Amino acid sequence: MSLVFNNASLVNLVHADTYSHTLQNIYQYQPQLNVMEKYWAAWYTYMNNDILATGLMFFLLHEFMYFTRCLPWFIIDQIPYFRRWKLQPTKIPSTKEQLYCLKSVLLSHFLVEAIPIWTFHPMCQKLGINIEVPFPTIKRMSAEICLFFVLEDMWHYWAHRLFHYGVFYKYIHKQHHRYAAPFGLSAEYAHPVETMSLGFGTVGMPIFYVLYTGNLHLFTLCVWITLRLFQAVDSHSGYDFPWSLNKFMPFWAGAEHHDLHHHYFIGNYASSFRWWDYSLDTEAGPEAKLAREERMKRKAEAGAKKRA
Ligand SMILES: [Zn+2]
Ligand SMILES: [Zn+2]
């Protein structure tokens, strides 16, 4: 019996043999719910098995959102007009290369990511992540998602920086650096250990949050994971447009930030924001190097003046 309404007789009343009938019943008996809540409630009531419903929904959400977000970048790569905004314009990934990457990412999705996805619901239940309708307010969801972005970015910065040390790089992270000029699909092209440990930032931070607050909705997690997927794919796109988000929010990392990381292999370890690399002086690229040298020179000169 689904817990989506937290009311067994209501679930029995609206449950039907098909998804569309269940949805119709919800329209009839629960008209006060918004459209998204109606579709959500119909899914859980129709499936009548919350573990399967959550597992299947997360798996499909991930596949659908990832590949639909990658598709526009794949198309843009085929159109020479867009080269003017390509960060490394001479390095256009070949279709063969992209297909190889696609095959590898799909294999990893089915073999590596399918397992945590299937065990996700029982864990959510234990933690108190709820699936009930109505959803929390937009204000609450937005605040939680902003917090997850900040926390994930922090985790990503340190874990990614660690992955650039000796054996971690050689045996794990090197795979992701196969492409010195990344493209959308290459966002999740990584060693399983990397997928798990960097993925912990996306799933583990909300877990810490719910352990602390005791209150988180699964729909908030769905929106957060979708936005985080978009961020990862976009930062690997290889394109920086005049209308890219980092032009309006200077602290947003975007493709320009991560492309430099792939190009130079060191620096720019954070995922979504620029503040970690900026404040810990790990920015990548020739401009950052020049600024760093300039700063060191000024410091040395000031030191010499003091001693004189
Ligand atoms: Zn790296
Ligand atoms: Zn990357």
Image: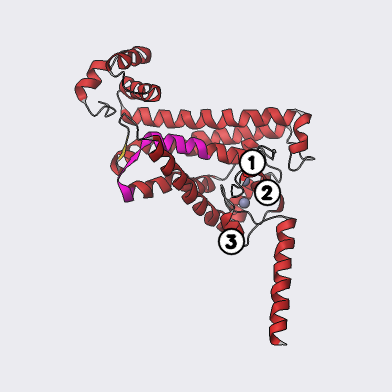
Cα–Cα span, label 2 and label 3: 20 Å
Q: Disc 1 marks which residue? A: 236
Position of residue 308 measured from the top left corner of the image (x, y, whole percent)? 73, 87
Q: Could you tell me if residue 113 is visible in this image?
A: yes
Location of the N terminus (image quadrant): top left
- The residues bearing labels 3 and 1 have C-alpha atoms spaced at a distance of 23 Å
Disc 2 designates what residue?
Answer: 262
Q: Which stretch is magenta?
A: 211-228
Closer to the chain start, of discs 2 and 3, is: 2
Above or below, 175 against 84 in this view is below
Instruction: Determine if the C-beta at disc 2 is less than 8 A from ligand 2.
Output: yes
Answer yes or no: disc 1 within 8 Å of ligand 2. yes
Protein image colouring: secondary structure
Are circles 3 and 1 on residues that touch, CB within 8 Å? no
Residue 115 at x, y = what percent? Answer: 43, 37
**Is label 3 within 8 A of ligand 1 (CB to nearest ligand atom)?**
no
**185 over 265 or under it: above or below:** above
Image coordinates for residue 112, horizontal then vertical, percent: 49, 39
Q: Is residue 188 visible?
A: no
Give the structural element (helix, strand or loop) at label 3: helix
Q: Quadrant of residue 215?
A: top left
Label 3 Cα crowd, 10 Å radius (few <14 / some 14-19 / many 20+):
few
Label 1 secondary element: loop
User: Tag 1: residue type?
Assistant: His
Q: Residue at x 46, y 44 (%)?
A: 146
Residue 305 falls in image quadrant: bottom right
Q: Which mark is residue 279?
A: 3
Which residue: 72% across, 82% down? 304
Callout 2–callout 1 Cβ contact below 8 Å = yes
